[in-house]
Amino acid sequence: MLNQTNAMNTETWVGNLIDKNTENKSIKILLSIITVFLGSFLLIISAKIKVPLYPVPMTLQPLAVLMIAMLFGRKLATLTVGLYIFKGIIGLPVFAFGGGFMYLMGPTGGFILGFFVSAFIVGHLADRGWGKKVSLSIISMLIGMLVIYSLGIFQLALLKGFNFALLKGFYPFLLGDFYKLLLAGIITPYIWKISK
C-alpha cells in the first residue's frame, strides 16, 4: 500500500508530524494507514453536514477534500478520498444521500470524481511545499475547486443540460465555496507553523 522506504513525504504537514514523532518505519506506515481511515471518516461527516438542495446538496466536502489534500499530501490524500469513494461504491451510505455504484452515475457523481482528482493535484502541490505560504495555499485550493466544479458540472450537464448544471450545480455554491477556500487557504500555513 505504501512504499516501505518512504512512507511519508516530509513536505506535507502529516508527513512532517509523523516523521518528527517516530523513526520506526513500521509505526510510520501504521500511522499513515490510521490517517487515511480517519480522513475518510472526516469526509463521511462532511458529506452529512448539508443543505439539501436539488440535485446537488451543499456540503462541507469540498472544504474537507482541499484541507486533506493540503495537509496529507498526494499519496495519503488520494488514498483517503479513494477509500471514501470505495466505501460508497460498495453501498455504504457515505455520500450525502446514500451510497452504491449507481450514485456515481447520478447528478453528483462528477463532483465526487472531482474530489479524487482534486486530492491528487492539490496533494501534489502540497508535496512541493505550497501549503506553507498563504498565497500558494489559496492558489492550490482554487485549482482544486476548479477541478471539482469542472468535473461536477460536466457530468451534471450530460444528465440535465449545461444551463441546468450552472443553475443548480455552480451558482448556488460559488460564494460559499469561495469563502471556505479562502479560510482553508489562510488556515493551512498556520497549521504548519504550529506543528514546528
Image (spheres, grey):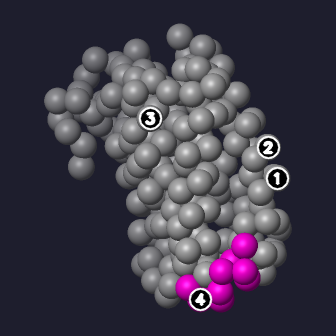
Magenta span includes 5: no
In three-dimensional space, the C-alpha distance between marks 4 and 1, rounded to whole angstroms, equals 24 Å
In three-dimensional space, the C-alpha distance between marks 4 and 2, rounded to whole angstroms, equals 29 Å
Circles 1 and 2 in contact, beta carbons < 8 Å: yes
In three-dimensional space, the C-alpha distance between marks 3 and 2, rounded to whole angstroms, equals 21 Å
Circles 4 and 2 in contact, beta carbons < 8 Å: no
Which residue is identified by label 4? 159
Which residue is identified by label 3? 125
Task: Using the image, tell me which numbered label, if any, was put on residue 179.
Answer: 2
Earlier sequence position, callout 3 versus callout 4: 3
In three-dimensional space, the C-alpha distance between marks 3 and 1, rounded to whole angstroms, equals 24 Å
In this view of the protein, which residue sits in the foreground, 37 or 82?
Answer: 82
| Residue 62 against residue 112 in the figure, above or below | above
Earlier sequence position, callout 3 versus callout 2: 3
Identify which amino acid the numbered label 1 is placed on: Leu
**Which stretch did the figure color magenta?**
158-166
- Label 3 element class: helix
Within 10 angstroms of label 1, few (less than 14), some, or many (20 or more) residues? few
In this view of the protein, which residue sits in the foreground, 137 or 171?
Answer: 171
